[in-house]
């Protein structure tokens, strides 16, 4: 974990000692520096934030070169903090500079830093621990999940179109992963998965939901894959699915039995290395839900 001194040094290096603005700076606009420049203007490949008092230059880093130009000083500060995290090689849980350090090193106002931090906290990129400081957040997909849930709930009178869209994306993702999943699980035994599908059967026969077993099943099936983004995406869509499906009311007992049977079929197809059978079981898994959304 980087020390405060290392962090401070990295910030200084990252921004090349950006020019300082007066404490009374007002709202700003952003403009790209021209290809040819006069003395005293920002060099190429930097973002110039022009204020009514002075001018601040926040250089481009790994992140900012990929994104559209910020239009406010708070947006430029957000980009600068992201660039610092990447440039300093920080990881989840590593400490960030203090608010006052960011103000000084980035040459921006305290209000711009606070607005930037609030946005980054909402995106789970920064975590504020009161009394301890700021740290790199978990960078989870929670913001995306919340947005998708809200989107699914936004138009309740549209015959659940938003929810149906989410389910269709899940089906598409599961089907797209049929080949790598069946290759990873061919002839492979796993006590945990056997227990999960057995618990599903037991709950379904009692007319009980098996939400937690459902989540564990899908996460476990993807764990052997080299690309863990599949796991994170599936978990995110599973969370959206789980949060929105209760709006449809309690599932029918026969649907729960069908879902439990489909999970067992998915596991067997994976162990057989049969991608086509896996896709068929996936279709069976989602059929009752799609019917309820139609």
Image (tube, rainbow, N blue to C red):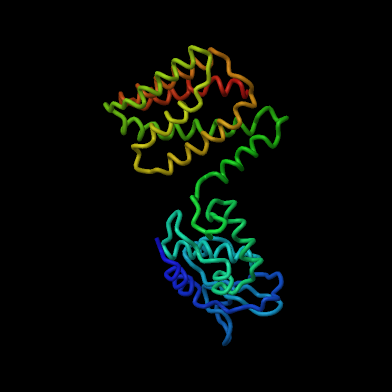
Q: Dividing the image into 4 quarters, which one contains the C terminus? A: top right
How many labels were placed on the picture? 0
Q: Nearer the viewer, residue 59 or 189?
A: 189
Toward which corner of the image does residue 76 lie, by quadrant? bottom right
Which residue is most to the left?
Answer: 187
Percent position of residue 194, x then y: 35, 22
Q: Nearer the viewer, residue 143 or 92?
A: 92
Does residue 29 appear left or right of residue 90 in this picture?
Answer: right
Toward which corner of the image does residue 163 lie, by quadrant? top right
Q: Residue at x 56, y 35 (%)?
A: 240
Against 3, residue 172 (above or below) is: above
Percent position of residue 264, x then y: 40, 20
Does residue 27 appear left or right of residue 203 in this picture?
Answer: right
Q: Nearer the viewer, residue 54 or 105?
A: 105
Which residue is most to the bottom?
Answer: 39
Percent position of residue 142, x then y: 55, 44
Q: Dividing the image into 4 quarters, which one contains the N terminus? A: bottom left
Percent position of residue 259, x then y: 48, 19
Q: Nearer the viewer, residue 292 or 132?
A: 132
Does residue 246 appear left or right of residue 235 in this picture?
Answer: right
Against 220, residue 286 (above or below) is: above
Q: Residue at x 54, y 60 (%)?
A: 67
């Amino acid at each position: 974990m980087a020390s405060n001194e290392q962090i401070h040094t990295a910030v200084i290096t990252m921004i090349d000692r950006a020019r300082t603005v007066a404490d009374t700076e007002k709202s700003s606009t952003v403009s790209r520096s021209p290809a040819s420049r006069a003395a005293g203007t920002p060099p190429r490949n930097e973002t110039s934030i022009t204020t009514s008092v002075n001018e601040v230059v926040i250089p481009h880093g790994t992140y900012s070169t990929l994104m559209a130009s910020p239009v406010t000083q708070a947006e430029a500060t957000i980009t600068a903090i992201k660039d610092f995290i990447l440039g300093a090689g920080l990881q989840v849980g590593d400490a960030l500079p203090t608010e006052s350090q960011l103000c000084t090193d980035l040459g921006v106002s305290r209000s711009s830093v606070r607005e930037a931090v609030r946005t980054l906290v909402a995106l789970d990129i920064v975590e504020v621990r009161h009394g301890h400081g700021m740290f790199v957040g978990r960078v989870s997909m929670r913001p995306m999940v919340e947005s998708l849930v809200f989107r699914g709930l936004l138009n309740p009178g549209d015959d659940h179109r938003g929810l149906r869209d989410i389910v269709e994306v899940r089906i598409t993702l599961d089907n797209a992963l049929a080949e790598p999943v069946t290759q990873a699980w061919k002839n492979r035994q796993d006590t945990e998965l056997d227990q999960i599908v057995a618990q599903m059967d037991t709950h379904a026969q009692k007319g009980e939901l098996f939400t937690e077993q459902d989540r564990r099943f899908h996460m476990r099936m993807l764990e052997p894959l080299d690309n863990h983004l599949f796991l994170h995406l599936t978990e995110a869509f599973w969370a959206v699915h789980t949060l929105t499906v209760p709006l449809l009311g309690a599932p029918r007992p026969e649907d729960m039995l069908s879902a439990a049977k489909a999970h067992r079929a998915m596991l067997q197809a994976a162990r057989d290395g049969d991608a086509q059978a896996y896709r068929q079981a996936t279709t069976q898994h989602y059929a009752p839900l799609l019917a309820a959304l139609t």
